[in-house]
């Protein structure tokens, strides 16, 4: 891919970042569906159902490694004229940093799901199951909601993985699009996240007490 000059380019606005993310979700969903169809045709419905979680992970990883890592930009980022850069220097993010971001986006969620399934099937791990399920169902969704609300307030990182690897987007187009503040939406999401996190913490505390009964 030809290098693109980022000199003087502004950071991308919230609307363009969300639009690019929606495009990427569309393309990655197509890849997942086709991968599942190929697996079902080759190995049968039962095998595909058994390994669906792994096939979905492979499909997502294939899409984002092939685009964000190997080609520097995803299809959604190209569509919206965005480029991944280091948040502090505005230099193009290295392939290693982009790869770490992709791994952080998908692998921890997959591993948590596997751990929940394992603890559900093993009686000696059943006390862990309730705790992990509460974290997955009641805590993490509200953490994501808080993060999304902060994104609407600040406009920096839509996904948590981008925050961890400190990658932001530059807007490369010569067109200057108006940036509509999303403060009210951000405040609502943060309020919902805080309330949900408070309620979810009770379930986590109950799960922790089950693991260490008095």
Image (cartoon, rainbow, N blue to C red):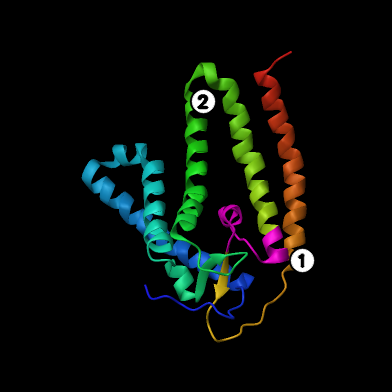
Q: Position of residue 170 (x, y in %)?
A: 56, 73
- 203 left or right of 117 in image: right
**Vertical placement of residue 213 versus 31, above or below:** above
Magenta span: 150-167
In this view of the protein, which residue sits in the foreground, 72 or 27?
72
Q: Is residue 72 visible?
A: yes
Residue 119's disc is 2
Residue visible at 50% across and 63% down?
93
Q: Position of residue 72 (x, y in %)?
A: 43, 66
Sequence-first tag of 2 and 1: 2
Numbered disc 2: secondary structure: helix
Q: Is residue 156 magenta?
A: yes
Residue visible at 68% across and 17% down?
212
Residue visible at 61% across and 77% down?
10
Mark 1, residue position:
184
**Vertical placement of residue 60 versus 6, above or below:** above
The quadrant of the image that shows the C terminus is: top right
Numbered disc 1: secondary structure: helix
Q: Position of residue 40 (x, y in %)?
A: 27, 46
Q: Sort mark 1 into few (<14), some (14-19) or many (20+) by Cα contacts within 10 Å.
A: few
Q: Position of residue 184 (x, y in %)?
A: 77, 66
How far is mark 2 from mark 1, CA to CA? 40 Å
Residue visible at 51% across and 54% down?
101
**Residue reaching furthest top?**
214
């Amino acid at each position: 891919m030809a290098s693109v000059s980022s000199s003087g380019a502004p950071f991308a606005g919230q609307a363009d970042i969300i639009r690019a993310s929606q495009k990427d979700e569309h393309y990655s969903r197509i890849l997942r569906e086709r991968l599942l169809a190929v697996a079902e045709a080759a190995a049968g419905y039962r095998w595909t159902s058994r390994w669906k979680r792994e096939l979905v992970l492979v499909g997502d990883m294939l899409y984002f490694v092939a685009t964000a890592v190997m080609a520097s930009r995803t299809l959604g980022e190209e569509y919206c004229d965005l480029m991944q850069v280091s948040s502090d220097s505005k230099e193009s993010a290295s392939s290693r940093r982009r790869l770490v971001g992709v791994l952080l986006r998908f692998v921890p969620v997959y591993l948590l799901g596997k751990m929940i399934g394992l603890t559900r099937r093993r009686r000696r791990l059943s006390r862990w199951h309730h705790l992990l399920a509460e974290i997955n169902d009641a805590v993490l969704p509200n953490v994501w909601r808080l993060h999304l609300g902060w994104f609407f307030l600040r406009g920096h990182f839509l996904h948590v993985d981008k925050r961890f690897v400190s990658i932001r987007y530059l807007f490369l187009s010569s067109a200057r699009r108006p940036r509509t503040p999303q403060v009210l939406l951000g405040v609502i999401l943060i309020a919902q996240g805080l309330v949900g996190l408070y309620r979810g913490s009770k379930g986590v505390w109950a799960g922790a007490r089950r693991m260490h009964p008095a």
